[in-house]
Image (tube, rainbow, N blue to C red):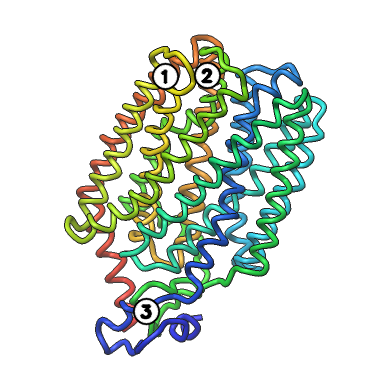
Amino acid sequence: MVEDVTTKTQGNTNPSTPGTAAEAKVPHRWRNLATLTGVMVVDNTEASATNSIFPAIASSLHLDSGHLGIMTAAGKVLSAPFGPIWVKISDKIGRKATLVLTGLFGALFGAMAGFANGWTMLLISVALMSASVIGAQPIVNAVIADSFDDKERGKASGILYGSINGLAALVGPALAQFTGIDSNGWRYAMWTLSGIMVVASIIVIFAFKDPGVGASDIQVSGANAKSVDEKPTMKEILGLFKIPSYTIMMISRFLSGHLLIPIFGIQFLVLERGFTNATASMVLLPFGIGAIVGNLGGGWIVKWLDVHVKHYGRIGFIQFAQLFFALGAFLGTQFMYDGITVYGVFWFIMGLSQGLNPPVNRPIVASVVHPRLRGQAYAIWLTIFETIAWAIFSVACGQLADFWSIQTVFLYITVGLLVLNAILLAGLYKTYPKDVRRVEMQLEAERA
């Protein structure tokens, strides 16, 4: 694999020639990014689609906000172990084949959800669909890290997530419009989503080219010590928890109060602001547009910060993203406005601030973890810690919403936790530069 990585880069890869490796470009990286966008749109839309059409599902199957919380939590809890499991499967059969399987299984269970005639079947089908498509997240993020070097990962992540949110902003509201057809409209939406999953899987088969583990890392070229192709041991995986910056990023997921908006945002606008399901779902468009602007703009800003404020710029930027979302959530959920347009403005602000996160938090994690461990690092961070956070928020807030109100939940959980998150992330100022240098030294030693 090391030989493959070396031959895939352009120019002189002689380790004794400084600087040449830095100019190497991984083949097919932009085509892969475009292909993986389709895969991630499926993962992103799976959650937003079920949440955006839930009022119609609730009306059809006689459910309430508590059921929405349980359904979301069940999907996240079941997904938690499947993230690392899918990564392990990719070690055996390859990342390409695994991405195809996640999409096809997701399509199967999504179609089953569309046929649900009661709460139990709906719950099981949606949970299994979530456990299927979750596998794309750690694999896609690892492939992007392998395709772009540290200087370009922020921009690449911004483009990836900007494209994802752009397509999701179209797909989400489009699926929600099915609810206006008749009482079975939500079923048509689920079947359409399943069809999208199948198409995305077919595109992966013909268009995706795996770059190889560590293909973008300068120090990998010419490595003759511990190869990046070796599979990580359990001891090494558990060792991720000893990386201070990575630990901070994991804890940060438990303080990600913004997770509530995609879950309960539409339900809030329907129940507590009086909009119809179809009308309330229209805020998904400005939210998606805001996320696109945040993703793309954030990627370029992070790249600029890396040049002018090395390391510390990323930390300040991710703190700003948390506080900006908290401000948008406070203004958008704690006051009543006439018409959906005003809410659309605040959903745009929340989408914008949420969009600022992927271009900075993915590169932060990638730069403090050895290339061989990135897949598992992303799996633990995104599919275990984040999904557990989703589950806790979903169940707790679903019950609290029935007892208090969704508006009150947004104030204390969304706004409050995001402020605490920004404070926690200040710990990176001490740990992040040291952790980055540790990985660089480790790779240099392996290359020597």
Residue linked to disc 3:
24
- Residue 442, image x and y in percent? 31, 71
Instruction: Look at 48% across and 57% down and name the residue there.
Output: 141
- Label 3 secondary element: loop
- Residue 301, image x and y in percent? 28, 52
Circles 1 and 2, Cβ within 8 Å, touching? The answer is: yes
Q: In the rendered image, which quarter is residue 11 located in?
A: bottom left
Q: Tell me: residue 256, above or below residue 270.
A: below
Q: In the image, is 81 to the left or to the right of 229?
A: right
Q: Earlier in the sequence, mark 1 or mark 2?
A: 2
Q: Quadrant of the C terminus?
A: bottom left
Residue linked to disc 1:
333
Q: In the image, is 395 to the left or to the right of 316?
A: right
- Label 1 secondary element: helix
Q: In the image, is 186 to the left or to the right of 424?
A: right
Tag on residue 268?
2
- Residue 119, image x and y in percent? 75, 25
Distance from Cα at disc 2 to Cα at disc 3:
49 Å
Q: Tell me: residue 267, above or below residue 116.
A: above
Q: Tell me: residue 3, above or below residue 258.
A: below
Q: In the image, is 181 to the left or to the right of 131?
A: right
* Amino acid type, callout 1: Thr
Distance from Cα at disc 1 to Cα at disc 2:
9 Å
Q: Nearer the viewer, residue 423 or 38?
A: 38
* Amino acid type, callout 3: Ala
- Label 2 secondary element: helix
* Amino acid type, callout 2: Phe
Instruction: Look at 78% across and 27% down and name the residue there.
Output: 184
What count of labels does the image hold? Answer: 3
Q: In the rendered image, which quarter is residue 68 located in?
A: top right
Within-10-Å neighbours for mark 3: few <14, some 14–19, many 20+ = many
Instruction: Look at 51% across and 52% down and name the residue there.
Output: 379
